[in-house]
Amino acid sequence: MNHPVEKPIGVAVLGMGNVGAEVVRILTEDADDLQARVGAPVVLRGVAVRDTSKPRDVDASLLTDDPQSLIDRDDVDVVVELIGGIEPPRTLILSALESGKSVVTANKALMAAHAGELSDAAARNRVDLYFEAAVAGAIPVIRPLTQSLAGDSVNRVAGIVNGTTNFILSEMAETGADYSDVLAEAGRLGYAEADPTADVEGYDAAAKAAILASIAFHSRVTADDVYREGITKITPEDLDAARKFDCTVKLLAICERFDDGGVEKISARVYPALIPLEHPLASVNGAYNAVVVESENAGRLMFYGAGAGGAPTAAAVMGDLVMAARNRVFSGRGPLESTYADLPVAPIDDVPTRYYIAMQVQDRPGVLQQLAGEFARHGVSISAMRQEGAGDDAKLIVVTHRASDRAQSETVAALESLDSVVKVSSVLRLEGTDD
Amino acid sequence: MNHPVEKPIGVAVLGMGNVGAEVVRILTEDADDLQARVGAPVVLRGVAVRDTSKPRDVDASLLTDDPQSLIDRDDVDVVVELIGGIEPPRTLILSALESGKSVVTANKALMAAHAGELSDAAARNRVDLYFEAAVAGAIPVIRPLTQSLAGDSVNRVAGIVNGTTNFILSEMAETGADYSDVLAEAGRLGYAEADPTADVEGYDAAAKAAILASIAFHSRVTADDVYREGITKITPEDLDAARKFDCTVKLLAICERFDDGGVEKISARVYPALIPLEHPLASVNGAYNAVVVESENAGRLMFYGAGAGGAPTAAAVMGDLVMAARNRVFSGRGPLESTYADLPVAPIDDVPTRYYIAMQVQDRPGVLQQLAGEFARHGVSISAMRQEGAGDDAKLIVVTHRASDRAQSETVAALESLDSVVKVSSVLRLEGTDD
């Protein structure tokens, strides 16, 4: 080692679930490497857990059920928050920042709701607030966006950022099984939680979309700004139909900058969408995550890897922890929150989208003409149309060109009220195309 | 803007080729965004070029043919070196660092040869030396490895890091055309330089492998440490044979940590290799680059994007420039070179590899037995064997299991001396398999 041994950097870990346990393990097993990389010993001062009597892979004397006292210790420099949820993490992190400690968190819900307040506290106290693990697990996304692309202009971020739903959609596409059967299988395999709502309804992805949009567009975007639809209504028929259009269905988090009649706006949204099979996200299967970034000068970049799991998420936490610890040794600081662009977030109605619409229609002369007229009346032009079956089973699938989502959804509502349309059986958006 | 306007950060650009011209354009066009992100105006002080009389897209008063005087100006804080080659860049960068200026460079040859000297100068003078653009153009690779994975242990980095050779191999695989024909086409399309030696002989990729190995393994690795083979001997027959083994051929830069009889060693090497079609690098085609990182906790990550070109490379330079400028405003510093692990670089002979060997053999009884005996005698076991043709055209293809590269190459030499082997027509390594 080239450096003289510096005063140790003390670490407090809050929460010892899957990720916390891995962080504690790495802090212990890799202590020598961490010391060499930080320039000072990195010492675990304590782990706050709810139940200190539960046996865990850590020296029992390090356990405490009082996170605030642990944070307050003079020998704690960096606090790693892995509890999850809004409270108590928000209060604990604010308290750590206000007392001059740097914070590393994997808490997407908290960052998506309170990034502004927390970042302000970090800036005021001249400490770091890092959250790489909050989006896409092990995959470096936050740091590339905030640092590597700091001199570029991001136009779009589109990602598969939820492993549970990607596993379910991949399985449905591969096996033709029903949503509910695959969800049950995902639960058995440990890919879905007992209450899968946050994943399958898109809340988890929406939190990540808010974080990504904020940093990509230098604006403050919260989870409430994100339009959100889940995957619970996706049927094997949808996946089947998608394939006929050389597409597959993925739950996407999309952050986009667009021109709305001369005004620069951004959109952040989460929904299951058709994407062309040749799109790089189409071949991201199972519990994997991937994020595609399109920027002015760098062009299209893709980042791929494990989006969840104890060790991968801990790897992201540890990268942040080493950087925060180094900054304390060298009196440096990472990038601050950047919200100068302050772009308005457009409601979904104003965002240009493309639709895929599957309908049961009456099989009689003039129906196609009537339907086509309805699209035209709303200013939505048709890109592709396919008719299947005949008689009572006659099914019509329409893919539209880009138009405002309002025009698209109003077209669907109008179609539903037509006599010749028995039922609109499925409506999905189409993403990842140039036109 | 939240910050009071700080003293401007002065930038000197050395070299105005493709990348330099883009950097100058972005500095001008995006001045407002850059100021907001840095916290101070970022001002171009001058551009050093060889011929100041050549018309260029920049205010002529900014041009100079005296780079040293530009660097020495009191109002220059960050020097962006885009000249390329070892000298004069080495001397210019050292001079900039010694006079307390931060440096951003895209110079892979220089970083692969003199990273130690340059990093020491940066550390001594407490300034930044950034070089994201030196590896894989726009794709963030250096920053993820040095920061995001700072708390993890990298086992392997394997990348397609040269667009010219990847274009050539992709075209050969797709069209069945000869190497020389595709090289000529690449030249016409602007994907290959008039003298393509640095690309097709693997020197460019070897420089990048040295840089990647250094930062991945916290050790000092130079281009001289990198074993290197080019793609000039690859034939359409090789690509054809690869396909029969469900593989394709890619020029890979491989950095690996391995256990050599109880001693931890690293290997850095560049050669065309067979990789299985299902490997994520197999579908990286054309002039694109991609880097796969395998680490202990994060697992397998992939980074994909444009590996060359003016604007993409400039995007990487600009990211570095914004970070270096921010550090000057906030008195911070990026990570230093980390070489504490100081792992020995093994010669190729000691590295475990797998071979693909194509031979013309005599078509008579006992030949297979004789050949198999030769493999066994060298301790190399056979994974797959395929015989094609008969009589004078009898061809045998063998794929081996992992063994030291010495054992593999000695086996090939022994095969060549056998009467029953008419000719060993092709030898390639196989990468990207687990066994």
Image (cartoon, coloured by chain):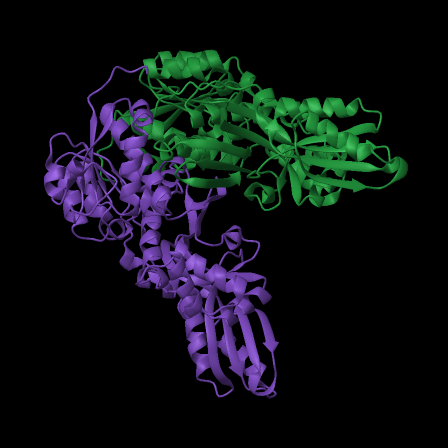
Chain colours: A green, B purple
**At which x and y percent is residue A1?**
25, 40
**At which x and y percent is residue B130?**
28, 39
Q: Is residue A199 above or below residue B300?
A: above
**At which x and y percent is residue B362?**
55, 86
Between B215 and B102, the one lying in front of the other is: B102
Q: Is residue A47 left or right of residue B194?
A: right
The quarter of the image holding the C terminus of chain B is bottom right
Q: Is residue A100 visible?
A: no
Q: Is residue A62 left or right of residue B55?
A: right
Res. A247 image quadrant: top right
Q: Is residue A73 above or below residue A39?
A: above
| Residue plotted at (76% across, 39% down) | A177
Q: Is residue B201 left or right of residue B244?
A: left
- Total marks in image: 0
Res. A3 image quadrant: top left
The quarter of the image holding the N terminus of chain B is top left
Q: Is residue B241 visible?
A: yes
Q: Is residue B366 above or below residue B411?
A: below
Between A399 and B55, the one lying in front of the other is: B55
**At which x and y percent is residue B316?**
34, 40
Q: Is residue B269 above or below residue A115?
A: below
